[in-house]
Image (cartoon, rainbow, N blue to C red):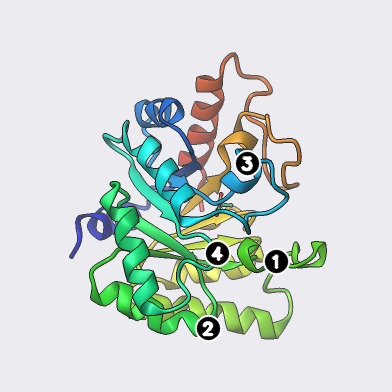
Amino acid sequence: MSKIRRKLLEFKKKQEQIACVTCYDASFSKILDELNIDIVLVGDSLGMVIMGDHNTHNVTLNESIYHTSCVAKNKNNFILMSDMPKDSYEDSAIAIKNATKLLDCDADIVKIEFKKDHIDVVKKLISKEIPVCCHLGYLPQYALSKEDVKVYGKSSNEYNSILEQAILLDNLGVDLILLECVDEKLSKLISDTLKVPVIGIGSGKFCDGQVQVLYDVIGISSNPPKFSKNYLTGSISIKDAIKEFYNYVKNIKN
Ligand code: KIV
C-alpha cells in the first residue's frame, strides 16, 4: 500500500476530518504547511484566480507542473495533490505520461474529473501505482454554461449514477474521492459507504473532509461560489483566517 493511501485511510479510521485548501505558490504553501493543512491542492482553479479566466478550460499541463513545483518547494507535512488539467488525460498512455510529470515535481496524488469513459485511465493509473483522486458531481472542466452550476444528485438518475461511480471507483482502488456540489444526503451516503475518504466542496458537512479555494477562504476572490465562506471576516490576519477554516473543518461532527 502506498504511503499516501495509508495516510488517507488513517484519517478515515480515526474519523478525523481532512482540511484541504488550494494553493498555487511557494509563499502560501509555506503558510499552509505551518498551519498543518492536510491536503494542499494545486487546482486548475488557477485558471480563474491566477490567470483571470472565467473557467478552468485553458489551464495547461505545463502550468499545472509549474505551480506544483512552486508549491512543492515548501512541502514538509501536507499531502500535495495536483489537478490534471482538461485534455491531459484523454487516454491511458497520455494520462500516465502526464501524471508522472506531476509526480516528478513532488505531487503525491493527481486528481482527474471523472466521466464514465475514464475507467481505463483510472485502472491504468492504479496499475502503475499512481495515487489518484476522482472528482465527481459538478465537473468544471466539462461545464459549458451557467446551467451546469447546480446541486448534483437531486434527480434519481443523477443520484444513482454518482453513487454507482463512487462505489465503482472505491472498488477499483482510487485513493480519494472529491465531491463538488453534490446533494448533502448523497454525500453522506457516499462518505458512509466508501472505504476511502471523501472530501467535499459545496456538498454539505457530512463528508470526511472539506475543500475550499484559498482565495475564497481569505476573501479575495472576485466571484466566490455561494457555498464558500470568507474566513478573513472576523480574523486579524490571513494566517488566522486559514486557521479558522482549519478549526472549522476539524470540529465538524458528523
Ligand atoms: O481546481 C480546484 O480548485 C478544484 C476545487 C474546486 C475542488 O478542483
Q: Mark 4 — residue?
A: 86
Image depth: mark 2 or mark 4 in front: 4
Nearer the N terminus, badge 1 or badge 4? Answer: 4
Dividing the picture into quarters, in which one does residue 180 lie? bottom right
Nearer the N terminus, badge 1 or badge 3? Answer: 3
Of residues 13 and 9, the one nearer the viewer is: 9
Residue 39 visible here = no
Q: Mark 2 — residue?
A: 116
Q: Which residue is painted at 45% across and 33% down in the image?
A: 25
Q: Mark 1 — residue?
A: 143
Relative to 209, 127 lies left or right? left
Indicate the position of residue 74 as horizontal and vertical percent values. 32, 31
Q: CA distance from mark 1 to mark 3?
A: 18 Å
Q: Is residue 27 above or below residue 3?
A: above
Relative to 7, 228 lies left or right? right
Of residues 80 and 230, the one nearer the viewer is: 80
Q: CA distance from mark 3 to mark 2?
A: 30 Å
Question: Label for residue 129?
Answer: none
Q: Residues within 10 Å of mark 1 (few under 14, many from 20)?
A: some
Q: Quadrant of the N terminus?
A: bottom left
Q: CA distance from mark 2 to mark 4?
A: 15 Å
Asked if the residue under mark 2 is in contact with the one under mark 1, i.e. CB atoms within 8 Å, the reply is no
Q: Is mark 1 within 8 Å of ligand 1?
A: no
